[in-house]
Amino acid sequence: LAQKRKAARLAKKKAKAAKASSAEGSETSTAAVNSTPDGDQELRFRHGPPVRPNGSCAAPTAADSASASPDNGRGGATPARRAQVNLDRGTEVVRREAELKRDALHIFRRLESTSTPDERATLCKEAVALYDDIERRVGAGMASITSGRIVYCNALMECGGLDALRECQDSRDPSATALVERVVPIIFST
């Protein structure tokens, strides 16, 4: 009975080793048969050296173990962060965004200070037109458009414009509703 158990364990180990070697594909592995002290043979399966994130197959160094991040609770180590590259956005891009912010602040400050519904409706129409004009003002690339929309919404938040927009929306102004539909997804997307 004991010999049958040993034979079954050996067969399982061989099957597991064969399955692992076929699943690994290009990774090099070696299987070695070693003798145990009692004379039985067992299969020992050894994988090649660990693969680093950059693709090299060198053995881990002390620097690798020092930079390894702790277990994040999801069953593995967290990946290392990439270094951020500082991009020069250019003076023209910064100038266009500053003009957009200036114009948006001008509209939202007037909206904040006005009290008549007609003036609020007119200013909401201006704000919607400015929002819809962002692509032409800052550029057609999606990064430029997104940056312009963020600048616009930051100007709105700086003036407390959400409160004024809420008041306009309560008065059933369709321009205010259109403006809210445009800016709320951007403001609350983070």
Image (spheres, grey):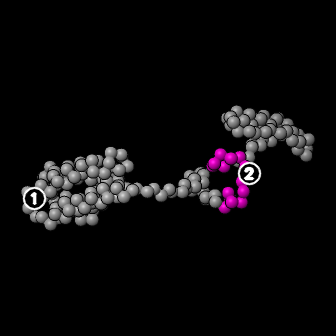
Amino acid on which disc 2 is placed: Ala
Where is the C terminus found, in terms of image quarters? Answer: bottom left
**Which residue has dot 1 on it?**
119
Instruction: Return the x and y of residue 92 as percentages of the image width and height.
Output: 34, 56
Q: Main secondary structure of the magenta part?
A: loop
In the rendered image, residue 179 lying in the magenta stretch gets the answer no
Q: Earlier in the sequence, mark 1 or mark 2?
A: 2
Residue sitting at 27 percent across and 65 percent down?
A: 158
Instruction: Return the x and y of residue 135 as percentages of the image width and height.
Output: 29, 47
Callout 1 secondary element: helix
* Part of the protein shown in magenta: 52-66
Near-viewer residue (53 or 138): 138
> Residue 156, can we see it?
no
Where is the N terminus found, in terms of image quarters? Answer: top right
* Label ID, residue 136: none
Residue sitting at 19 percent across and 64 percent down?
A: 109
Mark 1: give few (<14), some (14-19) or many (20+) Cα within 10 Å: few
